[in-house]
Image (cartoon, rainbow, N blue to C red):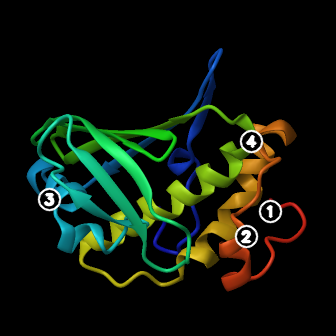
Amino acid sequence: MASSGQPQDQDYAVLERGESTVTLRFSRRLPHPPDKVWRALTEEKHLAAWFPTTIEGELAVPGSSLLFGFRHVPIPPMDGQVLAFEPPRLLEFSWGDERLRFELTAQPSGTLLAFSASFAETGRAARDGAGWHACLDELQYALDGLPVPWSTDERWRLVNPEYVSRFGPDAATVGPPQEWEVKYGPAGPGAV
């Protein structure tokens, strides 16, 4: 992410289309050690800075049930389950109908974060890609100890048109949830 706040090409997700699922794959190089990044992914006080929901349940216990509650939008909570927890390398869980996977690899200059989100509905890939993009940008600011210079909604609106362009019209048929649009306003043309 450039200091100007403009997304860099390498910050955008790649869309992989499978037979029954699609997967968004992000790769972010973070100038912080894996232990610090791991805490940001797993500790409640750090998650609040970038993850879109609260997480109730035993995140450190594979097989545990989780409950996700949205912080800023009145969307009903979602269920999930811990699929893998291997500190400080791998965290994977279901999040509603998505499977989220965070893999950390130590690098000489910090940590490579490989994040993927897999789900069945291709039409929401641009929407969700822009959403996770905004969240990962917020994670970078939180790790750097800097205030985020925009709201999640503003960031989503900035990057969503690029995801629509990159992924194509079939990946942009589902827009934001109605609760989001009631709070923030319609997504507008080209920002489905």
Question: What residue type is disc 3 on?
Answer: Arg
N-terminal of the pair, mark 4 or mark 2, is 4
Q: CA distance from mark 3 to mark 4?
A: 32 Å
Using residue 100 as the reference point, say whether residue 174 is left or right of it: right
Determine the image quadrant of residue 41.
bottom left
Residue 171 spot, x, y in % from top left: 76, 40
Q: Secondary structure at mark 3?
A: helix
Q: Residue at label 3?
A: 39
Identify the residue at horizontal 87%, vertical 60% (top origin).
190
Task: Give the structural element (helix, strand or loop) at label 4.
Answer: helix
> Which one is earlier in the sequence, the residue at label 3 or at label 4?
3
Badge 4 is on which residue? 166
Which amino acid is tagged 2? Gln
Give the distance between the C-alpha atoms of the residues marked 3 and 2, in whole angstroms.
Answer: 33 Å
- Between 81 and 1, the one lying in front of the other is 81
Residues tagged 4 and 2 counted as in contact (Cβ below 8 A): no
Which tag, 3 or 2, sits closer to the chain's start? 3
- Name the one closer to the observer, 189 or 11: 189
- Which image quarter holds the C terminus? bottom right
Q: What residue is shown with label 2? A: 178
What's the CA distance linking mark 4 and mark 2? 24 Å
Give the spatial CA distance, label 1 vs label 4: 13 Å
Label 1 to label 3: alpha-carbon separation: 33 Å
Q: Position of residue 54 (x, y in %)?
A: 33, 68
Residue lying at 58% horizontally and 67% vertically, measured from the top left:
6
Reading the image, the residue beneath label 1 is 191
How packed mark 2 is, by other alpha carbons closer than 10 Å (few <14, some 14-19, many 20 or more), is some
Amino acid carrying mark 4 in the image:
Arg
Q: Quadrant of residue 62?
A: top left
Q: Residue furthest right?
A: 189
